[in-house]
Image (spheres, rainbow, N blue to C red):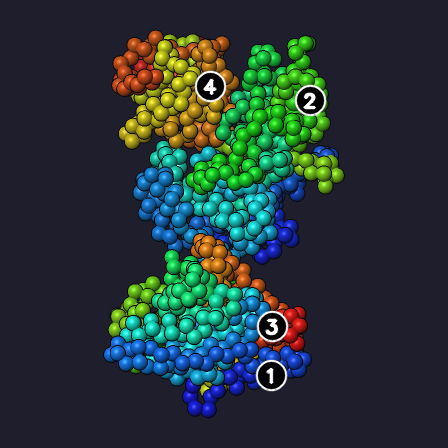
Amino acid sequence: MSTSKGYNPFTIAQAEFDRVAGRIELDEGARQLLRNPLREYHFQIPVRMDDGSVKVFRGYRVQHNDARGPCKGGIRFHPQETADTVRALSMWMTWKCAVADVPLGGGKGGIICDPHDLSPREQEGLCRGWVRQVSRNVGPVQDVPAPDVMTSPQHMLWMMDEYEVLHGGHFPGMITGKPVGMGGSRGRTQATGYGVVYTLREALRELDLDPADTTASVQGFGNVSQYAIELYHRLGGKTLCVSCWDQRDQASYAYFKAEGIDLQELRDITDSFGGIDKVRAAELGYEILDGDAWLDREVDILLPCALENQLTAESVQRISQQVKVVAEGANGPTTPEADAVLQERDIFVIPDFLANAGGVTCSYFEQVQSNQNFFWEEGDVLSRLDLKMTAAFHDVHDVAQRRRVPMRDAAYMVAIGKVAAACRDRGWV
Amino acid sequence: MNEATNIPRFTRGAWAAGEIVTRIGGGGVGGKAAGLWRLKSELLGELDPAGFTGLQVTVPRMVVLGTDVFDAFMELNGLRELALSGASEARVGQAFLRATLPPEHLGDLRDFIAQVDSPLAVRSSSLLEDDLAHPFAGVYATKMIPNNQPDTDSRFRALDGAIRFVFAATYFKAARDYFAGTGHDHGREKMAVILQEVVGDRHADRFYPRVSGVARSFNYYPSGAASPTDGVVSLALGLGRQIVDGGLCWTYSPAYPAAPPPFRDVGDRLRSTQTSFWSIHMGPPPPPDPLRETEYLMEADLATAEQDGQLDHLVSTYDVGADRLRMGCAGRGPRVLDFAPVLVGETLPLNSLMRSLFPLAERTAGCPVELEFALDEDPRLPGGHRLCLLQMRPMAIPDDSTRVAPVELSGAGVVVAADRALGNGAREGLADLVYLKPDAFDAAATPAIAMEVERFNRELLQAGRPYVLLGFGRWGSSDPWLGVPVDWGQISGARVIVETSIPGMNPDPSQGAHFFHNLIGLGVHYLTASTVGGKVDWDWLAAQAAAGETAHVRHLRLDEPLTARVDGLAGLGVLERSGVLERNGDSERNGS
């Protein structure tokens, strides 16, 4: 999430909420409750550094709403973390869990730090320190953290271990994103990317398009993009272009092949951060273009799966007339101005918190498995994921059709409506 | 015709909405599924229901996984090399059970199983079987699953496992031997899978249909006044496995449904009719055994079926005092599964339905056909019964004729004279003969004999030498007391098979549907030398030097090859020494 001066994500999140709350005529009590987090924890985390000194970090956990179940949301390590960023993200998690219809609420956490400057031991101290501060307020039945920006399965394991030490037992369901074999779920790696394509598949059905007759262009070549491309290809689709960040050049490039990319070929020349080897790609016959060239390709489908704010008022004008669907794999890739243009051009948009809800859905599966200490086969996980994502898509699409609103608005209406109903049912409002 | 494109695509909720046949994935649908689609889309529409009051004819609901699913599965899991490597069945099976089905189809499968909580048959449907117009019956696998667990997860896992088992069975030993025996390229095989509703009802822990049947519109073994074109029907209580695996069942000619069967006396009939039946085990799950085709199947006896109330239309009762059979199951006495109430008493129009189905099915398929069906009570229907057609496959019928006159059976140089013969035409140059030694034969040792035969079969198969197989009782019987219980793979190199009798081993000729299809499809001659009209020249056989010998089996390699001739219309056959034939010329063959 951008933290540039003047951009306050929490203000945007509240504005979106207010707009949709008005549309669905939400009562004042529910509006007051839902436009702010239920609980916030702000705390200091002292960590003894490798040089013997003690450094104090600022940590957060925000629980936006838990009317539908325990809060769920990641923990970010970011040098520009702010309380408002965490608040906004926790609110979006509430809506994402609701639209995916998993029985969880929304939460988010973070620590202001740059893990690149910390040794593994120091990072472990940070993780354990974060848990010590909130161990009474998170856990399998309260709030379940997960990896997010610059946090990894290893961080989750340290956090779980600290929690278990403090609570004197085994609680693998207190956190998700753990490695398979240590409480993690099979299928988690594929979940977000596959989830994007499950919703894309349904959108194409609604448009009466056979995936085998379509082409796509994808921004990003990380985990989400790779698995989205993988499943899209399995359905018969063809990807003509992918873009990614080049660490060495500190620039992004788009890799284009008119006859369609070979996913495995590109994976073989990609580093663990999703960066494609430019020289070897050229040797394999890929045309190397500017990083933003992915969005002006003559394709049927755009899959922004990397960064926020990529489809803006300006860049959206470059989108080909051929494009029929935009499936937002990334969080917030489309600005409101660009969204209006897409709507005007009658392009089918699958909004981010629906399209990329496969990740949190699989996290929910992981939590269920962890709580039972019984782990499913990959087929179990992926088949459930397909049904969940397909059902979520159609719930939203039905509202979009009935209320004659864009998919994004429909998704918000579904989500806010569910959470508000849970609050009412509990007698909170 | 590309059947796959005609079958509607599976849509979520389709099963609950009552769609009869749908498909998941593209590609071919294989011979079995194509036959079912023709039954549903063509044959059923032509059948006049007014003629069969009390019996509704239908096909069970099913979903077909196209061969694209198989291809994607093999590619995704990198299984082709192992599958064709000759690795053991267990290793291949384990690799398939550890693999995952393609993710693009998992959601549809889960949606399907979420809507279905009754038993399913997960059947193979081979693409090559369709392409080659060769019957592959019995080569691949069908897994029956109870599918009655209350939670979708358990049902999904069982379905997932059953599909992978069926995929794995494409490369099991029976299939490998079959391809080795036929010379076809195993690597070309692709498997579609049929997920088919099982017809039947639950009785305690058992689920089974009242009657299963196999009906062939052409009869290779006509008896009495029946002609080959009258066809033949085999009936059994419970699942059809009883019939297709060659177990005891009731076989009759639809032209003469009340004709007395070829039993010597009531005791013979009691011994030679079905006494147990197959059902799906609906009770607490058995110990897991995912690589066993019968993992969820169980056998029970007739008394159990009677407790279940399933014998009403099916049995006669032996009246000990009068030493005779009385139709039905009133009174005390042993029950005989002779289907007399249906076939003689005509309590259900089953036989008239069979006679009407044959010409329609032959017209639909363009050749003689074999139909599998199941009949069950359904109180919701006006007549109270439904008959579901489960399979239709074309029968390979010999098209050229080679006459064998009765007088030739006693001609010079005849090693085997068969008064009943299956197949048609001549097969020359048979230099290898494997036979069971009459003086060493022991009916109790038939399982061991099967292993000895398999050894010779393997050697001859590897050497590329077709051979004659000669033995006692039914080859391939599931009952080791009725014959040698080989599976097809154990004798797949035999191109002429002879069955004869010996005291203590004198059953009816083989009736196993799988064997028949393989025999005819591969052009194997099947000779039956009965004690009445046939003969085997044991002295001549004993006088030949053995090329190999085990406790019960001898292998001859003859300098002077044999020739087998079968007259498909007359049902007669001979195995004769070629040299004698050449010396005697045509005069002897023509009996002039």
Q: Residue at x 37, y 17 (%)?
A: B436
Q: Quadrant of residue A4?
A: bottom left
Distance from the alpha carbon under mark 4 to that under mark 3: 70 Å
Disc 2 marks which amino acid?
Cys
| Residue named by callout 1 | A18
Q: Which residue is mark 3?
A: A419
Viewer-proximal residue, B370 or B341?
Answer: B341
Are marks 4 and 1 in one subunit?
no
Disc 4: CA contacts within 10 A as few (<14), some (14-19) or many (>=20): many
* Marked residue chain, label 2: B
Label 3: chain letter: A
Residue wearing tag 4: B481
Number of the front mark, 3 or 1: 3
> Label 2: which residue?
B329
Please name the amino acid that badge 4 sits on: Trp
Pick the front one: B364 or A366: A366
Residue at 55 percent across and 51 percent down: it is B152
Mark 2 secondary-structure assignment: loop
How far apart are the alpha carbons under marks 4 and 2?
A: 28 Å
